[in-house]
Image (cartoon, rainbow, N blue to C red):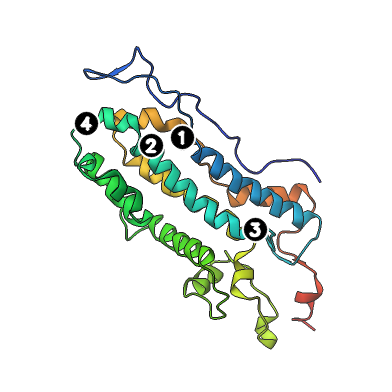
Amino acid sequence: MKQRHVIAQLHIPLNTALSESSSSGDQVVPTSAATTISGWLIHHVGHLYEMALERIVQKKGVRHGINGAARYGHSAYILSVVAVEAFINEAYLGEIPRLLFKNSPLWNLSTDWLERLELQTKLILVPQLLFGESFDSSAQPHQDMATLIRVRNDLVHYKMQVKPPKYIKALADTKVLLGNPRAQIDGSDYLWPDKLNCSEGIRWAHNTACKVVHTMAEHTDERLKSQIKGLVSNFAEISESDVLLWFEENGIDPASHEPAVIVDDLHP
């Protein structure tokens, strides 16, 4: 197999603060020795996707088009959510925003309360209190993030329930999840946890996290935006064009299936 990485190179900023000689208005922001973990977390999700592609080229497990059965797909949903929350904590709840926005009403809230706040609420509330604006909770990518959080919660609290959650059909309709073509003729299909455990599911979780981070950055005050650009750059989406190029370079027809007999049976 040709060794071409489809995920972006990780950028880890060694210093996430302004330099000692830099200032924001009259406020000099000290150098920080802290580094990021959000970048590593989203990078790990990218590695899970590359591992799923390795399984495809090795013909391990079923594949329908560019979507193949994965081995560690469930972990990707959990890590993607964790990466977003880590980013929020690093970028908006750390020392730098406290220095730059001393008078923000955000700091009137207790740290313990903020820590316990549901991520979906934190995504909206934190930038709103810091900068006076936030992104639309009724639009993308917040809607996909809400679904991703539900997936994460259902996996973490999985009780071997047979009935699939409501979001499974919606994700399956958009080809995010693994579907069995034989369901068209005999009703047989994969169980919903197995549907989630696939390469395109991993890519969707990864890209949803990336879109949320970049959307938050768009609504960030310029004084802070310049300081977190290194953190934001870690969240680079994996495009479908990159995936199709990978299939081409590895001699795999992206419209084919593995094993082929599964689909051939549909057209006797």
Distance, label 3 to label 1, CA atoms, is 25 Å
Query: Residue 37 location, x and y as percent?
Result: 51, 38
Labels 4 and 2: the sequence-earlier one: 2
**Number of marks in the rendered image:** 4
The image quarter in which residue 77 lies = bottom right
Q: Secondary structure at mark 1?
A: helix
> What label does residue 231 carry, if any?
1
For this view, does 135 lie left or right of residue 140? left
Task: Work out whether 185 lies above or below 62.
Answer: below
Q: Secondary structure at mark 3?
A: helix
Three-letter amino acid code at the position of disc 3: Ser
Q: Are marks 2 and 1 in contact (CB under 8 Å)?
A: yes
The image quarter in which residue 194 lies = bottom right
Tell me the crowding category of disc 3: few under 14, some 14 to 19, or many 20 or more residues within 10 angstroms, Cα based: many
Q: Residue at x 38, y 54 (%)?
A: 119
Distance, label 2 to label 3, CA atoms, is 29 Å
Q: Residue furthest top?
A: 21
Q: Secondary structure at mark 2?
A: helix
Q: Which residue is mark 2?
A: 91
Q: Which residue is mark 4?
A: 102
Q: Which residue is mark 3?
A: 199
Q: Nearer the viewer, residue 193 or 174?
A: 193
